[in-house]
Image (cartoon, rainbow, N blue to C red):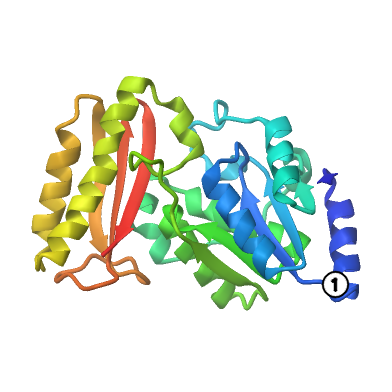
Amino acid sequence: MLIRKIKDMKQITKRLKKEGKTIGFVPTMGYLHEGHISLIRYSKKDNDITVVSIFVNPIQFGKNEDLDRYPRDLERDVEICGKEGVDYVFYPSADEMYPEGFSTYVEVEGITQRLCGTFRSGHFKGVTTVVAKLFNIVQPDKAYFGEKDYQQLKVIQKMVRDLNIDVEVIGCPLIREKDGLALSSRNKYLTPEERKSALSISRALFRAKQMFESGEKDPSKVIDEVKRIISSQPLVKEIQYVEVVDPEELTPKKKLEKGDVVAVAVFVGNTRLIDNIKL
Ligand code: PAF
């Protein structure tokens, strides 16, 4: 069922709680792909009721980012949700989420200043604000986020801990295409030639893991190799970062350990792609 109004969603939430139902929640910006579908399936497995939100959150996009061209297809998304047995699709308007005079934000310090935070100022503040709002509206027992946006997952887990929000934030494995490309709604922007160049990202990450498994402990060697593989591609415009970080603090590592995360952000043409792998 498609719910557009915050008031209606809150009413449903209240009723479900009264009935003792557990609520699983998958927040999305729509244009659903197999990555989202896997989150929906985890939620369906763990909870009585599954709610998916679709909201392209304007405040997490920078001035020169892709808010206006971000892909949207509500009809197709609702169809996918129906097929997957989602109970409620929450599709609020930006006007209702951010009415005139809106002035309260949630900001996690520290880990938001690293990796993507260095390049997308204000992005995580937009994410944590909308996710806190959505948590208040949907009141989920469990919420599901992809490890593709690894930093986002860690930021949201920190917010929930710091603010004592009563929800379990569950990270779910990143899903790749058969050829290795990490699933993202933004892959739609890629031309066939750009897509070919973009494959170097996962190839480089697999190589990083292989180096670690063969005994490499020096992050700079791994980082150099990842950069070399990615930058060898003609349509790679810019490597924003390649870092090996601690899986919780997201601080750079001096010596590699199992569980560390190699994270990258790359512009292929005008499309910014992120990806990561756990060692
Ligand atoms: O990952 C996303 O799609 C978005 O950042 C989220 C978590 C739905 C918040 O707008």
Q: In this view, does 17 lie to the left or right of 133?
A: right
The residue positioned 31% from the left and 57% from the top of the image is: 277
User: In the shown orientation, is residue 163 left or right of residue 138?
Assistant: left
Say which residue appears at 88% left-offset and 53% top-offset. Answer: 7
Give x and y (percent) for residue 136.
74, 64
The residue that mark 1 highlights is 17
Q: Is residue 10 visible?
A: yes
Q: Position of residue 1 (x, y in %)?
A: 84, 46
Residue at image position (60%, 62%) is: 42
Q: Position of residue 230 (x, y in %)?
A: 20, 38
The residue shown at (50%, 61%) is 172
Picture quadrant of residue 252: bottom left
Residue labelled 1 has its Cβ within 8 Å of some atom of ligand 1: no
Q: Can residue 130 be seen in this view?
A: no
Q: Give left or right: position of 262 versus 190.
A: left
Q: How many marks?
A: 1
Q: Looking at the picture, does residue 194 appear above or below residue 18?
A: above
Residue 89 lies, in percent from the top left, at 76, 47
Q: Residues within 10 Å of mark 1 (few under 14, many from 20)?
A: some
Quadrant location, the C terminus: bottom left
Q: Give the vertical position of 94 relative to 222 (above or below).
A: above
Camera-nearest residue between 166 and 124: 166
Establish if 27 lies above or below 218. Answer: above
Which one is nearer the viewer's eye here, 245 or 121?
A: 245
Q: In which quarter of the image is residue 100?
A: top right
Residue type marked 1:
Lys
Q: What element carries label 1?
A: helix
